[in-house]
Image: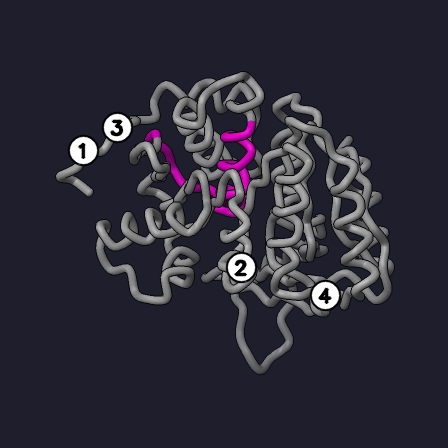
Amino acid sequence: MIYTVTMNPSADYFMSVPAFETGVTNRAEATRIVPGGKGINVSRVLTNLGIENQALGFLAGFTGQFIESALKKEKLNTDFYHTEGMTRINVKLETTEETEINGTGCRISLADERALLKRLETIQEGDTVVLAGSIPAGAGADIYKKAVETVNRRGARAVLDTSGLPLKEAIAAEPYLIKPNASELEELAGKKLSEFKDILEAAMGAVHAGARHVLVSLGGEGALLVTENGVLSARPPEGSLVNSVGAGDSMVAGFLYGLEQGLSPEECLPFAVASGSATAFSEGFCTKEQIERLVNSVDIRQMEEEEK
């Protein structure tokens, strides 16, 4: 069973304003509101792929009720913990440049944090738990570290997709997989990564710090899978970028899809890149058919020592 944990979900309000100007009243041509959050997106893709999963996390207020109701309409299996306050609203302006205004989320208490960790105590050996996104106000920076430790004690796999101090803290707990992008890896390393060798060095540093597998998403350049056993690079298939939202989350789901088929982590890499690409080339999240069309076009290469 795969569980996704979205600590700080959102109601994402998309507004299409082609001629946006500051200081005046703007009128949107179209609007839509959808549930958002990295773990939720992973659950969406896993559901598209026919993989059983359950979405966990914190929700609050009428926005939280909207998210839960909308996800049930999408046929997602959910078990959110409801707390005080209001789940945040993120405004996404679709104009000449994509602009986002992320709201402040609900503040969780120590009791809320303990309730989530207690829920993770019920998972079974062999399960996978995806811990994704930012952490809510009130949560300790070590909340992901505690979650990874709990998952590991249960004999399950912890997959981590976050950034900043929560990521740095949690790596020491030895997650099965982390999925930073280049800027998140830069933040983790604490320095500018201006060249490819710098990115590779930082990813190897994350492995030495405790992460068993580091999947680095590089956008249109593909991805790297770095482990103690070596480095694989993946070039994505050709296609036109339509929407980058959720491409990284789709990579995580594609990787897990491969694991669910009994593949090795190295064999999962093409599915991860194909999934991210399929979402990037589409209006919505990728489907199994789209991934299967692209997976054989992903160019996988073992990096030799002199290239590192």
Distance from disc 2 to disc 1, alpha carbons, whole Å, reads 31 Å
| Residue at (68% x, 45% y) in the render | 150
- Read off the residue under disc 2: 169
> In the image, which is nearer the foreground, mark 3 or mark 4?
3
Secondary structure under the numbered disc 4 in the rendered image:
loop
Give the class, few, some or many, for how many residues have Cα within 10 Å of label 2's Cα (few <14, many ≥20): some
C-beta proximity under 8 Å, tags 2 and 3: no
The tag earlier along the polypeptide, 2 or 3, is: 2
> In the image, which is nearer the foreground, mark 4 or mark 2?
2
Q: Is residue 133 magenta?
A: no
Query: Which contiguous range is marked in magenta?
Result: 237-256
Closest to the observer, 207 or 79: 207
C-beta proximity under 8 Å, tags 4 and 2: no
- Read off the residue under disc 3: 301
Q: Amino acid at mark 2?
A: Glu
The tag earlier along the polypeptide, 4 or 2, is: 4
| Residue at (37% x, 48% y) in the render | 208
Q: In the rendered view of the protein, which quadrant contains the C terminus? A: top left
- Identify the disc placed on residue 105: 4
- Read off the residue under disc 1: 304
Residue 47 in view of the camera: no
> In the image, which is nearer the foreground, mark 1 or mark 4?
1
